[in-house]
């Protein structure tokens, strides 16, 4: 219900305030109203602001009128949280980090108040599974603060979980309130790192490595290839990691960007605790630079068991609307569209003026909360580095974390750090249109594609790029499936690839990415026939499996993957 100021003024004029206070049906509701009024008063009269004369953050003024001395409630910290060091406020006010992580440390409460696009059981499970990343984020910042922040117990609250406030009339049914009250309380505890790798990055060394790799920008691929090379030759970058010294960098922007990237890889366990390589990091370094971030997100989704072709389950007591008739796509189509939706498209306008898809909206609810956690991990790594030496702030260029895509290539941005921005589901919707196309005339397909998606700059070329990304991810999954126990996903991707290949052949093979069709045709005819028969059998088996069995297999495999995910090579 929206607040109507005119209606509020009219209500106030009808009777004195004390009369309205006596109309509450229960004492609990009246106490809640009084509590809200008192909090509002404190927010208005004692909001913390930056006082330039003393260069300190403190309440604006007194809560008691006509008092010369500043007075605030003794439980002021319960509303605003504990006071943080001034350097943290400096980082927030200059837009270097967001307010989320410092606010959580100050108030001792992590609230996920935003509702997902589609509320699913998988979304709620993922929110709980991301606890480890959130604890690492808080621990990285708490390590540079007073020890008491590292010992805090953070209360976690989600939109569907119980609230400390009394039930309001019309806000929830009795069954909803009972269900929420039965939800166990979740807590976070900052994971202050006891030992971290001793990264030592020199400006001369990083220039030499850029020249060796023939690149001009620091990124995940650059750091992974550099680390792998140093690991193989036992170079100084690798040998110094276990020294136990503090991190050190030259006063250079690229060195700072490389350090944050390396710390991210370390905390995501793509680099082993002893500084060695991992199976996943070794695979990711061979992915082209333009696909590094979407491929990393896809593998993270796989890590949490959220990347599959199985339909999503509705949240408890929140069934999907009957009108959507979910699911309406095959298992292969769901997997293909979800994976390819991670690749951004070039749009003529900011607004998507074509179809939307229920399954992709649910999938991107998961991607959104995962990307947000990875972005928090990036901010925490940067804040940890800056809090050790605030002079490093001067190394950050303007727009260092700007996620706005370049007009020429939407997969690139001016940011020097990972942004983990949520891509729109446009590419997934275009993929579904391609998979559901029934004709064989490539020219007619190209014309209707442009008519159905007028907001896309070049949907055909973007579709080819998405096919290339699918091939890259399929290669990665194929190589890590056996050592990491992800054979189920490799099996599903193989079956989905056959569906994709058949659809490409239906249009005369003109939609194969560069080299894709030729590589397929270079196989001997007998080997092609055997592979097609075997894959067709796997595809039939995959399509015939029930959602319940597939979900159980995915959950079991995800549990197995969690145990061996970061196995060193």
Image: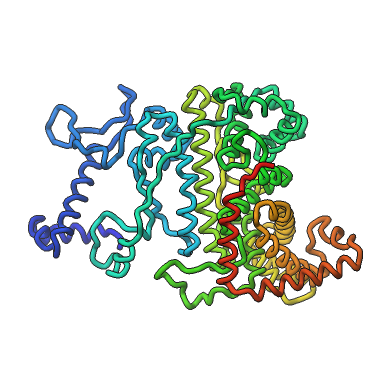
At horizontal 59% and vertical 51% (from top left) the residue drawn is: 300
Quarter of the N terminus within the rendering: bottom left
The image quarter in which residue 568 lies: top right
Give the left or right position of residue 57, taking residue 475 as reference: left
Q: What is the count of numbered marks?
A: 0
Residue 410 higher or lower than 55, as above or below: below
Give x and y (percent) for residue 191. Answer: 45, 38
Residue 460 higher or lower than 240, as above or below: below
The image quarter in which residue 211 lies: top right
**Along the line of sight, the residue nearer the viewer: 21 or 349:** 21
The image quarter in which residue 61 lies: top left
Give x and y (percent) for residue 527. Answer: 88, 65
Give the left or right position of residue 192, taking residue 11 as reference: right
Give the left or right position of residue 525, taking residue 457 as reference: right
Quarter of the C terminus within the rendering: top right
**Along the line of sight, the residue nearer the viewer: 157 or 518:** 157
Give x and y (percent) for residue 359. Answer: 56, 67
Residue 543 higher or lower than 36, as above or below: below
Q: Is residue 416 visible?
A: no
At horizontal 66% and vertical 74% (from top left) the residue drawn is: 543
Q: Is residue 390 visible?
A: yes
Colour scheme in use: rainbow
Residue 30 higher or lower than 333, as above or below: above
Give x and y (percent) for residue 542. Answer: 67, 71
């Amino acid at each position: 219900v929206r607040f109507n100021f005119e209606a509020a003024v009219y209500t106030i004029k009808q009777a004195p305030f004390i009369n309205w206070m006596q109309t509450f049906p229960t004492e609990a509701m009246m106490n809640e109203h009084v509590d809200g009024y008192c909090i509002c008063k404190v927010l208005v009269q004692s909001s913390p602001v930056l006082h330039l004369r003393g260069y300190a953050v403190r309440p604006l003024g007194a809560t008691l009128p006509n008092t010369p001395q500043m007075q605030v409630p003794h439980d002021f910290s319960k509303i605003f949280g504990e006071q943080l060091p001034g350097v943290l406020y400096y980082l927030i006010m200059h837009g270097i980090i967001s307010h989320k992580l410092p606010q959580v440390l100050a108030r001792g409460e992590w609230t996920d108040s935003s509702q997902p696009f589609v509320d699913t059981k998988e979304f709620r499970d993922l929110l709980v599974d991301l606890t480890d990343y959130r604890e690492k984020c808080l621990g990285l910042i708490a390590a540079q603060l007073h020890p008491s922040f590292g010992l805090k117990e953070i209360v976690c609250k989600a939109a569907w979980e119980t609230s400390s406030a009394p039930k309001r009339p019309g806000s929830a049914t009795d069954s909803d309130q009972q269900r929420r009250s039965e939800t166990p309380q979740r807590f976070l505890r900052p994971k202050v790192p006891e030992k971290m790798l001793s990264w030592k990055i020199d400006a001369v060394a990083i220039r030499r490595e850029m020249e060796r790799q023939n690149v001009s920008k620091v990124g995940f691929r650059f750091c992974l290839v550099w680390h792998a090379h140093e690991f193989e030759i036992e170079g100084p970058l690798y040998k110094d990691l276990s020294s136990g010294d503090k991190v050190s960098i030259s006063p250079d922007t690229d060195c700072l960007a490389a350090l944050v990237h390396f710390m991210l890889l370390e905390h995501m366990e793509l680099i082993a605790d002893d500084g060695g390589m991992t199976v996943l990091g070794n695979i990711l370094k061979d992915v082209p630079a333009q696909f590094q971030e979407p491929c990393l997100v896809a593998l993270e989704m796989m890590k949490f068991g959220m990347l599959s072709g199985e339909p999503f389950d509705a949240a408890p007591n929140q069934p999907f609307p009957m009108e959507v008739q979910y699911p309406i796509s095959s298992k292969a189509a769901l997997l293909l569209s979800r994976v390819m939706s991670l690749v951004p498209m070039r749009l003529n306008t900011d607004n998507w003026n074509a179809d939307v898809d229920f399954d992709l909206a649910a999938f991107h609810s998961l991607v959104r909360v995962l990307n947000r956690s990875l972005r928090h991990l990036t901010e925490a790594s940067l804040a940890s580095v800056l809090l050790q030496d605030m002079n490093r702030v001067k190394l950050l260029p303007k727009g260092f974390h700007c996620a706005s895509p370049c007009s020429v290539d939407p997969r690139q941005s001016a940011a020097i750090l990972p942004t983990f921005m949520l891509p729109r589901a446009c590419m997934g919707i275009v993929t579904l249109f391609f998979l559901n196309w029934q004709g064989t005339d490539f020219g007619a397909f190209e014309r209707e594609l442009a008519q159905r998606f007028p907001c896309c700059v070049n949907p055909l070329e973007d579709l080819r790029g998405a096919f290339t990304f699918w091939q890259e991810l399929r290669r990665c999954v194929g190589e890590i499936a056996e050592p990491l126990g992800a054979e189920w996903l490799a099996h599903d991707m193989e079956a989905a690839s056959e569906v994709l290949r058949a659809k490409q052949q239906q249009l005369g093979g003109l939609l194969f990415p560069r080299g894709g069709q030729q590589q397929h045709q270079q196989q001997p005819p007998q080997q092609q026939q055997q592979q097609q028969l075997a894959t067709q059998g796997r595809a039939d088996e995959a399509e015939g499996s029930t959602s319940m069995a597939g979900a159980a297999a995915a959950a079991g495999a995800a549990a197995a993957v969690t145990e061996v995910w970061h196995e060193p090579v």
